[in-house]
Amino acid sequence: MLQLDLVRLIAGCVILGYACYTDIKTRMVKNTLWIITIFIGVVLLIIQYMVGELHNWYQLLFIPVIVVIVYALYYIGLLFGGADAKAIMSLSVLIPFWPDIYGLPVYPSIMPFVWAVFSNSIIVFILFPPAFLIYNALKGEVELPFALFGYRMDTETAKKKFVWPLEKVDGGKKRLVLVPEDFDCTEHIEELEKLGFKRIWVTPKVPFMVPLLAGLIISFTYGDIVFSILNRII
């Protein structure tokens, strides 16, 4: 139903957009947001049932399946943030069916819609390293593997920016640090300054919630990227 699909699109983008904002600013997303998401999803499903548009009701059976799979991915560490897992779970209730908004998405698939959102967000996420590499190559600063995960910045500037240091000196050798020990890395940067570092490799504090929002928009417009590629190959 067009009107309900538009409401789901707007609600999903607004909620994930706000989640991105709070996640970037505080590294926390309140559970209230996901409760609201589920509530909106349930209300829309009731409306869809009352107007006689709940044709593919059997697809609702995928909701508990998605919840179990996402929880398992979070439990084994493939999803780093609990908020990311909760976002995907709540989206499975908000958008349980593939939408149809003026012929979009172009490439829907046989997989549940929220799974396409997840897979599309992973594709967006893995595009970061080549994007960083191209950016650093254009600046003439390519030092692998650091150039795949961030860019160089003056230490004084880094302390004022929303970034994490990618470098750590251990045993007299510089090594890559992908997962920071603390959210506030000012002391870490100051330690590097004491060792004589004036410019260091840093990575922006971009949570997975941002690729997840991009994956949602891509899923509503383009569709399932993986399915479209497989469909052309097979």
Image: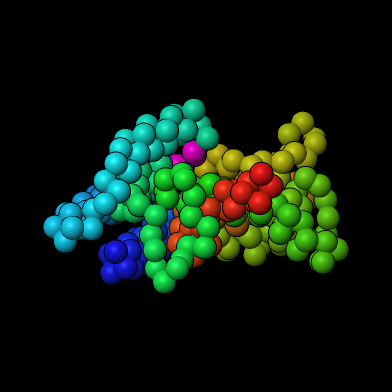
Of 169 and 81, the residue lying toward us? 81
Q: Residue at x 75, y 39 (%)?
A: 175
Q: Residue at x 46, y 66 (%)?
A: 104
Q: Quadrant of residue 66?
A: top left
Q: Quadrant of residue 101?
A: bottom left
Residue sitting farthest toward the left: 50
Residue 139 in percent (x, y) is at 81, 66
Residue sitting farthest toward the bottom: 102
Q: Quadrant of residue 58?
A: top left
Residue 131 in percent (x, y) is at 71, 59
Q: Is residue 162 magenta?
A: no
Magenta stretch in the rendered image = 79-83
Q: Residue at x 26, y 46 (%)?
A: 57
* Residue 67 visible from this viewpoint: no
Of 52 and 151, the residue lying toward us? 52
Q: Please, is residue 201 above or below residue 76 in the view?
A: below
- Left or right position of 173 against 22: right
Q: Residue at x 63, y 60 (%)?
A: 158
Q: Please, is residue 233 above or below residue 20 in the view?
A: above
Where's the C terminus, which quadrant?
Answer: top right
Residue 154 in percent (x, y) is at 71, 62
